[in-house]
Amino acid sequence: MDFTLNIYKKLLESLKQNGYSFYTFEEYCSGKAAGKYVILRHDVDLNAGHSVATARVEAEMGIKASYYFRVVPQSNQPDKIRSIAALGHEIGYHYEDLSLFKGNTSLAIDHFDNRLFHFRKFYPVKTICMHGSPTSKYDNRNIWKFYNYRDFGIIGEPYFDVDFNEVFYLTDTGRCWDGERFSVRDKVNSTFKQSYHATNDIIQAANSGSLPLKIMITTHPQRWTNNVGEWVLEFVLQNLKNIVKRLIVKK
């Protein structure tokens, strides 16, 4: 089955065996990424406990990743955040302030500043990443038309600070790796033509040498589990979400 911790570990193993180094987004923004590499990013939308599980798998393999937490209680769980930070991973803010305050930029930036302070209790947060908020008409990135995140000590936001014509973007949005038709905002402009549906397709590409040399991989850890009941529940719920999101994309 796809989207298990077992297949996730196989993906990481195949990338390591084929010469890829792993970097957090903070390390990438600091100019440390070089050669053949993966920027490993996780958006913790829900079920923070699953993020602890992926963080442990990575730590056991000597891999560091970036974990972006939302303010909602399903994500913002201090004990889980501390556990992930203690394993050596980067912690960032998965911001959705503009959507939360229905486009009110003044309230949104105050909330952003407040929540950034909160997450810095667990890690010296240097990078942020927008939450897509697919049911909202507000694109959370638009807050930066009025403010500058660098004024808050932030050195990077993936959708602004990565050249996706140079770095190949892979995201499991839609519970597949080619789910752009289900994605409202988690997509990028890129000249890369490669497309992969299943995790095994990426593994095969890595083994054959056809995978691009520079990659950002984004996962949503709530999808990845070895627990059969949780796997089935996420499968059903994601299929329902995809129907809704596809209708939104078509508007």
Image: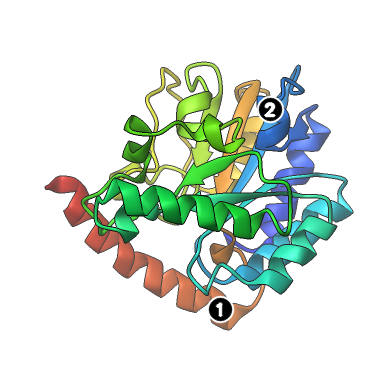
Label drawn at residue 169: none
**Place of residue 70 in the rendered image (x, y in percent of width and height, measured from the top left):** 51, 60
User: Is 160 left or right of 20, judged from the image as shown?
Assistant: left
The quadrant in which residue 178 appears is top left
**Place of residue 5 in the rendered image (x, y in percent of width and height, measured from the top left):** 69, 62
Tag count in the figure?
A: 2
Closer to the observer: label 1 or label 2? 2
Let me know if residue 132 appears in the view. no
Instruction: Tell me which numbered mark, 1 or 2, is placed earlier along the sequence.
Output: 2
Q: Is the image coloured rainbow, by chain, by secondary structure, or in one colour?
A: rainbow
Residue under pointer 2: 28
In the depicted structure, whether residue 142 falls above or below residue 61: above
Mark 1 and mark 2 residues within 8 Å of each other at the beta carbon = no
In this rendered view, identify the residue nearer to me: 46 or 230: 46
Which residue ends up furthest to the bottom in the rendered image?
A: 229
**Place of residue 194 in the rendered image (x, y in percent of width and height, measured from the top left):** 47, 27
* Residue at x 50%, y 19% (from the top left corner): 163
* Residue at x 79%, y 52% (from the top left corner): 58
User: Is 157 left or right of 38, judged from the image as shown?
Assistant: left
In this rendered view, identify the residue nearer to me: 183 or 28: 28
Residue under pointer 1: 230
Secondary structure under the numbered disc 1 in the rendered image:
helix
Q: Amino acid at mark 1?
A: Glu
Quarter of the image with the N terminus is: bottom right
Q: Amino acid at mark 2?
A: Tyr
In this rendered view, identify the residue nearer to me: 50 or 19: 50
**Place of residue 150 in the rendered image (x, y in percent of width and height, measured from the top left):** 54, 30
